[in-house]
Image: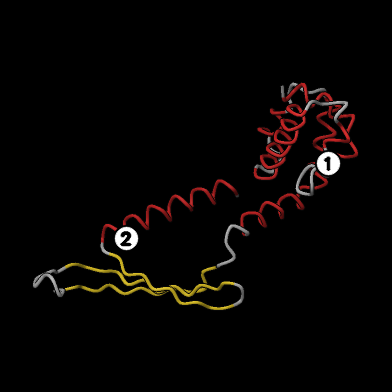
Amino acid sequence: MFVCLLHRLKTCQTRILTVFPCEPPHRGDYSATWSLQEWLQLLDSLTALFRLAVVNNISDEVLSQLSDVSSSQAEVVLSVLRAREEEIRCALLDRTNSISSATLQDFDWQLKLALSSDKISSLHTPLLSLSLDVRENGALRPVTLEMNRDELGMLISSLESANKVVLQLK
């Protein structure tokens, strides 16, 4: 279906520039050409292709996605990608950054050994005290966490998973 939709791409060469990252073209302008399902699939496919192209620097993997398309139509898509690559990259970064406006400015940690508590006379449990300085909307906000070994392990696993996602986006 993607290939079929790309074959029709030539009819909207002038509008493809607005598919991503700007506001997409209005379906009403092309309702005679594509059904609603085809239109949504075209927008999704082009957006995914543009993301893949920008993330992979218009690699062979992206070119293989266009292998079933005629060379003139593939050239139209590639010329749009090349012309708007930096703008698309910035839009992807802005979208990622908009997930949270908070950024980590500084951190400090301390390892403590809890020898007892009000409920248990002999505890001997190591605790990590993690102090984070988070900048949110221009204001610096301190955040302090205290974790035992299991909680620290879960935090490290979560951060490693997040790092893998970030590396995949680069």
**Disc number at residue 103?**
none
Amino acid type at mark 1:
Pro
Is residue 10 found left or right of 98 in the rendered image? Answer: right
Badge 2: few (under 14), some or many (20 or more) residues near its Cα, within 10 Å?
some
91 displayed left or right of 77 = left
As drawn, 163 above or below 138: above
Which residue reaches farthest left?
A: 121
Which of disc 2 and disc 1 is earlier in sequence?
1
**Secondary structure category for the residue under label 1:** loop
Residue drawn 32% across the image and 72% down it: 129
* Neighbourhood count class around disc 1 (C-alpha, 10 Å): few under 14, some 14–19, many 20 upward: some
Q: Which of 58 and 111 is in front in this view?
A: 111
**Where is 81 relative to 42, above or below?**
below
Image coords of residue 94 (percent x, y): 67, 57
Residue under label 2: 152
The image quadrant of residue 66 is top right
Q: Name the residue under label 1.
A: 25
Question: Residue 71 appears at what percent x and percent y?
Answer: 83, 25
Considering the image in quadrants, where does the N terminus appear? Answer: top right
Query: Of 85 and 152, which appears nearest the observer?
Result: 152
Alpha carbon of mark 1 to alpha carbon of mark 2: how far?
47 Å
118 lies left or right of 149: left
Say what amino acid the circle numbered 2 marks. Answer: Leu
Residue at 76% from the left image edge and 52% from the top image edge: 86
Quadrant of residue 143 within the rendered picture: bottom left
SS at mark 2? helix
